Amino acid sequence: MPDNTIRSNSEVVLIGAGIMSATLGLILKELQPDIKIEIYERLDVAAAESSDAWNNAGTGHSAFCELNYTPEKEDGSIDPKKAISIAESFEISRQFWSYLVQQNKVPSPENFIKSVPHMSFVWGEKNVEYLKTRFEALQSNPIFSEMTFSTDFNQLKEWMPLVMEGREEGEKLAATHMEIGTDVNFGALTRSMFNYLEKLDGVTLYFNHEVKKLRQREDKSWRIKITDLATGQKRKAYTQFVFIGAGGGSLPLLEKADVPEGNGYGGFPVSGQWLKCTNPEVIAKHQAKVYGKASVGAPPMSVPHIDTRVIDGEKALLFGPFAGFSTRFLKNGSYLDLPLSIKANNLIPMLSAGFHNIPLTKYLIEQVRQSPKDRMKALREYLPSARSKDWKLEKAGQRVQVIKKGENGGGVLEFGTEVITTHDGTLAVLLGASPGASTAVAIMVDLISRCFTNQIKTPEWEAKMKTMIPSYGKTLNDKPELLAEMRKHTAEVLKIK
C-alpha cells in the first residue's frame, strides 16, 4: 500500500492554539522573522478551551485581589513574594500587548482589555485582621502602593454598592481596592494574535489536527505524528523544537514524548461552573472584581469572586466558580483522560498527593453534591439581596492541577503554572492553571531564555526584546520611577487606567 502520509519540516512546532502558543509564536517571529512555525490545534477554532472568555475568570491576574497568592503563615504574617512576582509578570504582559497594539499587530485594545477595579472582600474579625496584615505587607511595595484598605461602611458601599445591599452597619467587614485592575478577554486577544500570525510567511496553523505521537530522534530533532480529524489524513511533522501548550491536554502529550524530565508528573482535573446573572439592572449595579477567601481545601481556581466581565462588547456578571470533579482533562476531552494518564512512574506521586490532600477531596465531593439552593446560599454571602430568578448556572472551563514527585518520592500537588523543559532545550511543556494567561508573556520569555540559550544572548535578540518589553532585563518592584513610566505608557496605549 502506498504511504499517503504528508510530511513537513519546520524549526518550531506549537501544539495547542491557546494564549501560550500565540504568545510564544509571536515573540519568536518578532525575534527571528524568517523562522518557520507550524501550529496544531485539535479543535476547529483557536482559544476554545482555557483561553476562552467563558472558561476563565478574565482577571488580569496581578495579585491585586487574589488572596490565595498571599497565604497566611502560622505566626499570622504574610509573605508577599509570590504576589509581587505575579504582579510584575502582569506588567510585562501589559508592555508586550501595548507593543502589539502600537505596531497594529492586534486590533483596538478595547476588544480585549477593560479597566475594572480589583477588590478583596472579607467578613469576620479574624479575616478582617488578615486582610489588614496583607494590605500592610503589600502596600509598602511600589507595585501595590496604590492599594487602599477600608473597614468604613460608607466607603465599602461606594466601592461595591451591590455587595453592600442588605448588610447591617455593625458587621465586621473589610476590603482592599485597586483602581488600576483590569478585565481581559483572553479568547479575543488570542484569536487576534493568531489572525496576525497566520498572515506571516512561514507560519501555518492547522485546525482539527490532533497530535497522536511524538518522538525524539537521534539527531535531537522531533518527529510528530498527527491526524486530520476532518479527513483522516495522516501527517508527519519534523522539527527542531516543540512547545506543548495544550492546557489540560499537555500532560498526556508529555507522557507520549517519553522524556526523563516528565517522570513522576501527574494531573488532577478540576471542573468549574459559574452562576451567571440574567438581570441587566443587577449587572449594571456592579463594576468590580471582588475576590473573597477560599474554603479550606479549595484549589486556587475555586476562590469565590463576584465578577464584572466584558465579553464581546457586552457587560456580564458572574459568581463562582463552583468546583467539581470530572475525569476529563479538557472541556472537550475524554472521560478516559485521567485513568489513561496514570503510569508506573507517576502512580506513587498521584496516590501520595491524594492521601495528603484529603481536604481537597472532601471539598470537591461537597461541591459536586451542591444543590441550586446551596449555590444561592454561597452567592448571598457576597450579594445578600440576590434572587434565584436572576441567576442561571453555566459550565466553566476544565483545569488540571499538577502533581509532581516530591523530595521524598511522594507526590506534591502544585497550584501554579509550571514549565518543564528538556536538558537539551528541544521540548517545553506548560502544565497547570492559575495565574496562567495573565503571565503568559513572562512565562514565554523565561522559556525562550531556557530553550534558545545562544540566540537570546545575541545583541539582535536582546535589542528586539527591549523593543517589545521596555523593562526587559530589569525588575519593576524595586524601581518606582521605571514602574510609573511603564504603567503610564501601557495605560495610554491600552486605553485603561
Image (spheres, rainbow, N blue to C red):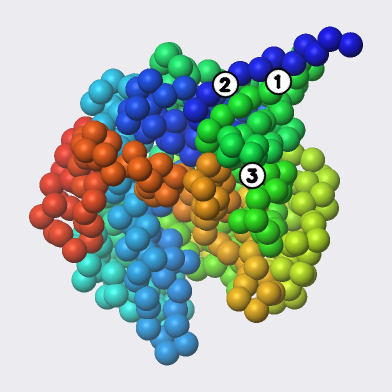
Q: Position of residue 337 (x, y in %)?
A: 78, 46
437, above or below 414, in the image: above
Q: What element carries label 1?
A: strand
Amino acid type, callout 2 = Asn
The N terminus, quarter of image: top right
Tell me which residue sits at (22%, 67%) in the image. 141
Amino acid type, callout 1 = Arg
Residue 282 in view, yes or no: no
Q: Which of 311 and 35 is in front in this view?
A: 35
Please indicate whether residue 40 sits to the left or right of residue 364 in the image. Answer: left
Q: Which of 38 and 116 is in front in this view?
A: 38
Please indicate whether residue 467 sits to the left or right of residue 307 in the image. Answer: left
Mark closer to the observer (3, 2): 2
- N-term mark: 3 or 2: 2
Tell me which residue sits at (38%, 20%) in the image. 34
Quarter holding residue 476: bottom left
Q: How far apart are marks 3 and 1 (CA)?
A: 20 Å
Q: Which residue lies furthest to the bottom in this view?
A: 75
Q: Where is residue 187 in the image (x, y as percent from the top left)?
A: 50, 32
299, above or below 19, in the image: below
Label 3 environment density (alpha carbons within 10 Å; few <14, some 14–19, many ≥20)? many
Mark closer to the observer (3, 1): 1
Tell me which residue sits at (53%, 33%) in the image. 240
Q: Name the residue under label 2.
A: 9
Q: Name the residue under label 3.
A: 250
Q: Mark 1 points at which residue?
A: 235
Q: Where is residue 101 in the image (x, y as percent from the top left)?
A: 28, 27
Q: Which of 3 and 300 is in front in this view?
A: 3
Q: How far apart are marks 1 and 2 (CA)?
A: 11 Å
Q: Residue furthest left?
A: 481
